[in-house]
Image (spheres, rainbow, N blue to C red):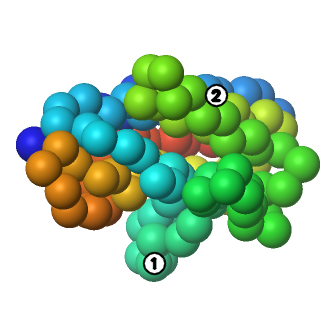
Amino acid sequence: QVQLVESGGGLVQAGGSLRLSCAASGSIRSINAMGWYRQAPGKQRELVADILSGSRINYADSVKGRFTIIRDITRNAVYLQMNSLKPEDTAAYYCTMTITVVGGGNYQYWGQGTQVTVSS
């Protein structure tokens, strides 16, 4: 079994910063992709940023230049550094990893979600 545990959300004023963390544990053979999604009330879940195989990084246009996704393979972890936060960044943030597990099989896992609230 594999678990993803997130931390780092909270309440921050517009213009502030937060750093989200997500660590995977369990029967991990390799991690093939890592990413962050978010979902605001009444909206669909959307991609914020991801790191694919070969270290290719993608960002949503709305966060380019403000957010940075960071991967730490040694800790099976991914981080999201969020700067210059805006009220429209308010959402539940979810990490995801595509993992090859011990014994074979490639699966996508999700964290439990962490709330980010940006006040104006």
Q: Which quadrant does the N terminus fall into? A: top left
Residue at 83% x, 38% y: name it.
84
| Residue 18: mark | 2
- The residue drawn where x is 29% and y is 41% is 29
Which residue is the extreme one toward the right?
65
Q: Is residue 50 visible?
A: no
Query: Residue lying furthest top in this view?
Result: 75
The foreground one among 100 and 7 is: 100
In front: 72, or 88? 72
Q: Earlier in the sequence, mark 2 or mark 1?
A: 2
Q: Amino acid at mark 1?
A: Gln
Q: Residue at x 18, y 44 (%)?
A: 102
x 54%, y 71%: residue: 46
Left or right: 19, with 98 as reference point: right
Q: Position of residue 103 (x, y in %)?
A: 13, 50
Position of residue 110 relative to residue 8, above or below, is below
- Reading the image, the residue beneath label 1 is 44
Where is residue 4 drawn, in percent x and y? 28, 39
